[in-house]
Amino acid sequence: MPPNVVLIVADDLGRECLASYGGESWETPVLDSFAASGMRFSHCYATPWCFPSRVELLTGKYGFRNTGAWGEFDVDRGTTFAQLLRRAGYATCVAGKWQLCRFDDPVNADHPWRAGFDEHCVWIGELRDATGERRYTPKYWGPWVWQNGKRREDPAQRYGEDVFREYLIGFLERSRFRPFFAFYPMLLPHLPYQPTPYSGPLARAIGALPTRLQRQFDSRYFADYLTYLDRCVGGVLAALDGLGLRDRTLVLFTSDNGTDPAISSSMNGRTVRGGKSLMTDVGTRVPLLASLPGVVPAGSTCGDLVDLSDFLPTFAELAGAPLPTGEIFDGRSFWPQLQGEPGRPREWVYFQSIQTGFDRAVCTQEWKLLQSGRLYHLTEDPWEERPIVPDGDSAESARVRARLQAVLDSLAISAPESAKGGRAAR
């Protein structure tokens, strides 16, 4: 019988924040223990922005195959991992951040269901006001929640992450006698930085200050956010244990992009500023932890290249579900690696940014080439401080440049319409 799957995705969490990756600034004991119980991937990549990362994750396709306006994902164009698993007999649920459509448009009332989720309890996110301007609804305290096709009114006095975690755990309880796929795209630790239910009186007092004064205390709140994120992950794991499902459930933890630039962390003795929005390693290289007792080797590390497009084919392989014909998928399954086998590792990963002038990059564990022509030797220059331009190529870097440029050329496209005048989601 194929395993159940729980996929947890943090919102704006770079690997420098976790002790399992050398982080020294923040305490996340649950995630530290989780990493020790399973496998840590050292080279997992996302795009530097949330919306394109989430679409890539859902579809197994790179962003240029999913053109469209920011925050508006066309679920009817192709296959998502939830649709694939639902067809394979899995019960499916999403609880947390959606932000792939506007729920003030009646056509989107069943958007998560059409994306493949039998149940959904998600943050409404973005709406347009009477003037047509975008605005963002509350998400941490008094969240606006869209649940199974309609607005839920009762969370007015509640903390958003609690609402979504509790719904997800309820789904685990309801689905424990059949295969299930639970997708938990967390709100945390994305800004705005505000007190959590576990924040002390000082943090609550700071929260009463005007927003312009609060920003100088972002790091204090970020520490609280990671504490709460860690406890939420622990709550999901405890629920699986309590239901007797932990040994039959693959749990994956990753992130959609790097940490917000307002946050600096210490990593292996170096101060690292968050890289969200940047095409750097800090902006695009994210944590990926996996655990399935008895299947995923405990305390192991995988150095193979992985990106967010690889999750869909991985889920297809573990469920024994064939990939649909007639669609191009960019991902490659890492299910063999999760079982401690060699698998068929990638030679390169690709990512792009549509919010910063439309840039693209392809990289290996050793080298990275950007569309601008900047080449970095990552093993010798891991912080990307010494770009190699074509005129400065050595014989080795010229060979590498030609090989990676051929990959970029094979994925040659023009900037999609959504990149023109786009803006980042908050």
Image (cartoon, rainbow, N blue to C red):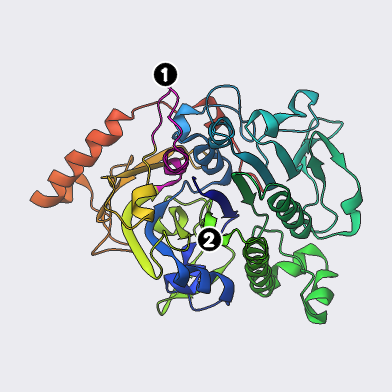
Q: How many marks?
A: 2
Task: Indicate the position of residue 300 as horizontal and vertical percent values.
Answer: 36, 67
The residue drawn where x is 28% and y is 30% is 409
Amino acid type for the residue under numbered disc 1:
Gly
Q: What secondary structure is marked by label 1?
A: loop
The answer to which quarter of the image holds residue 74 is top right
378 or 88: which is nearer to us? 88
Q: Residue furthest left?
A: 395
Amino acid at the residue labelled 2: Asp
Crowding at mark 1 (Cα within 10 Å: few <14, some 14-19, many 20+): few
- The residue at which mark 1 appears reads as 326
Give 290 or 196, whichever is nearer the viewer: 290
On the image, the x and y values in percent for residue 85 come to 55, 36
Q: Say whether residue 315 is magenta.
A: yes
Residue 261, compared with residue 104, is above or below; it is below
Is 320 in front, or is 105? 320
**Would you name the residue on which mark 2 appears?**
247
282 left or right of 145? Answer: left
In the depicted view, which residue is nearer to us: 75 or 71? 75
Looking at the image, residue 302 sits to the left or right of residue 311; the answer is: left
Q: Position of residue 79 (x, y in %)?
A: 53, 28
Mark 2: few, some, or many residues within 10 Å (few <14, many ≥20)? some
Residue 217: image location, x then y, percent: 70, 73
Using the image, determine if residue 155 lies above or below residue 221.
above
Name the front one of labels 1 and 2: 2
Chain part drawn in magenta: 307-330
Question: Could you give the CA–CA distance between mark 1 and mark 2, rounded to whole angstroms?
Answer: 36 Å
Q: Earlier in the sequence, mark 1 or mark 2?
A: 2
